[in-house]
Image (spheres, rainbow, N blue to C red):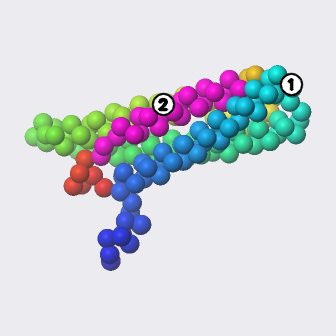
Amino acid sequence: MTKARRNKKNPSRADRLNDTVELAEKSKNILDELTSDLNDAVELGMDKEQNTKIVDSIIDALMNVEDARDRVQELHDEMESWAGNMEGTNLENTQKYEDVSSARDILDSAVGFLNNIDIKDTAELTDMDASDLLEYVTDAVSELENAIDECSGVEFPGAFGR
């Protein structure tokens, strides 16, 4: 089996993280685009059709946020397990251990930011007025930006870092 073919079936951690960041950025962009509509809705009011359209977009973004959070958590858990397997050995005094621990800690921080996004359901969002939706979306965008920034600082260890 060629290396390129194997990589499609078993993408590296870095590739999985890049895909996850793209998913988080997609969510952030969806939510960012809604802020102008929500600013207008705060000023002018929002009818039921407009509310439904905005809530549907938020739900789409939140589904991607949940997926991204789960993926980052999975990568964190892998780094946690790897670091745990190195503890109690002479390996915990190596650069590899430091690299694994650093990746784990940064991923932990990213998961924290993603966990700060309160995943609301359609009914909860529909019941919110435009100003509350705007605040909710703005807060979610901020947390996504923080998580994306954290993920960009992750460097997985080489060799067995796949």
* Kind of residue at disc 1: Leu
- Give residue 10's mark: none
* Kind of residue at disc 2: Asn
For the point 43% across and 49% down, the residue is 18
Q: For the residues marked 2 and 1, what is the alpha-carbon distance in whole angstroms?
A: 31 Å
Check disc 1 and report the residue beneath it. 44
- Viewer-proximal residue among 47 and 102: 47
Label 1: few (<14), some (14–19) or many (≥20) C-alpha neighbours in 10 Å: few
- Viewer-proximal residue among 9 and 3: 3
- Give residue 146's mark: 2
Quarter of the image holding residue 81? top left
Main secondary-structure element of the magenta-colored stretch: helix
- Viewer-proximal residue among 65 and 145: 145
| Mark 1 secondary-structure assignment | helix
For the point 36% across and 70% down, the residue is 4
Residue 156 visible, this angle: yes
Q: Is residue 38 magenta?
A: no
**Residue 54 x, y percent position in the rendering:** 77, 38
Q: Is residue 144 magenta?
A: yes
Q: Is there a contact, CB below 8 Å, between mark 2 and mark 1? A: no
Label 2: few (<14), some (14–19) or many (≥20) C-alpha neighbours in 10 Å: some
- Viewer-proximal residue among 36 and 77: 36
| Mark 2 secondary-structure assignment | helix
Quarter of the image holding residue 84? top left
What span is in magenta? 133-156
**Residue 88 x, y percent position in the rendering:** 15, 38
**Label located before the other in sequence (2 or 1):** 1
